[in-house]
Image (tube, rainbow, N blue to C red):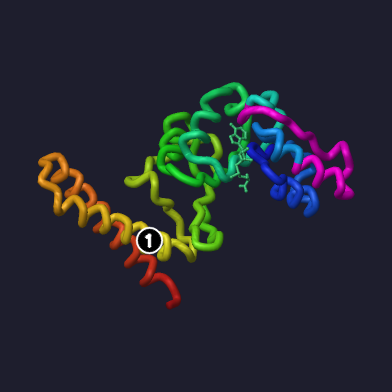
Amino acid sequence: MADIGTDHGHLPMWCLENGIVPFAILSDINEGPIGKAKLRIERSSMAEDSYSLRLGSGLSVLKPGEADTVVIAGMGGELTSRLLAAVPEVTDSVQRFVFQPRSRAGMLREWLWSNGWRICEERLVRERRRLCQIFAAEKGTQEPYDYPDIPECEDPLMIAFLDRELVNIRIVMDNLLRSKEPADRNKLEALQRKASILEQRREVLWKNSNY
Ligand SMILES: C[S@@+](CC[C@H](N)C(=O)[O-])C[C@H]1O[C@@H](n2cnc3c(N)ncnc32)[C@H](O)[C@@H]1O
């Protein structure tokens, strides 16, 4: 596996320590993080031939076919999409990506759908107050979601995710209601439709849950 933007190197270290991967590439664009990862992995009992440290941007540090699975976690969806588009020969050689976009997840999903990738698994994870979207992509086609920014999965945290989303939508709707701009009328109607669809999804999840 390759972990792009590895920072402290926790994830590849964990994968190696638990025998999940036989070899990991730890990469980062900045010297500080890659220095930390280097220190950590060198202090561990990890065999030197089980990892490689690389300094550079995105997938440019990889040769085509070098990593089966590539993780890009903790960057924005827009930057992640740009990194995927920048080195198509490497991107196309990957079997599975795992993403954890910090923002603009919808933009990343749209890039994937337009470039021959399908989302094969989605999870939500709580990190302190934040609900993080994590998803894996493999080659294939998929009908785009109605709302690419919203995960479509039956994760136990999905109700909490939708609740937060609905609160945010209602705040924007309140502001639009006060606006006199004619264009805001269309935005308001679009948000009303979105809120109603998300409420229906929430209702189905709630009925199927064991609460
Ligand atoms: C918020 S940290 C995420 C660390 C780790 N992946 C995680 O999820 O906990 C983002 C890391 O991405 C690195 N980074 C930012 N832009 C990058 C790029 N274009 N290529 C590689 N790494 C990058 C930063 O230096 C930083 O270490």
For image coordinates 79% across by 34% down, the residue present is 52
Q: Element at badge 1?
A: helix
Front position in the image: 54 or 144: 54
Find residue 74 and report its horizontal and vertical position in percent: 57, 45
Residue 186, quarter of picture = top left
Residue type, mark 1 in image: Arg
> In the displayed structure, does residue 36 sit left or right of residue 102?
right
For image coordinates 80% across by 38% down, the residue present is 51
Most extreme residue toward the bottom, as rendered?
211
Find residue 76 and report its horizontal and vertical position in percent: 50, 40
Find residue 194 and report its horizontal and vertical position in percent: 26, 52
For image coordinates 48% across by 39% down, the residue present is 77
Q: Is residue 142 magenta?
A: no
Q: Which quadrant of the picture is home to ligand 1?
A: top right
Residue 64, quarter of picture = top right
Residue range highlighted in magenta: 36-59
Q: Is residue 55 visible?
A: yes
Rendered-image quadrant of the N terminus: top right
Examine the rendered structure and indicate whether residue 49 appears above or below residue 191.
above
Front position in the image: 5 or 204: 5
Location of mark 1 (residue)? 164
Front position in the image: 202 or 166: 166
Examine the rendered structure and indicate whether residue 195 appears above or below residue 73.
below
For image coordinates 42% across by 65% down, the residue present is 160
Examine the rendered structure and indicate whether residue 55 appears above or below residue 23.
above
Q: Is residue 1 visible?
A: no
Find residue 7 and report its horizontal and vertical position in percent: 67, 43
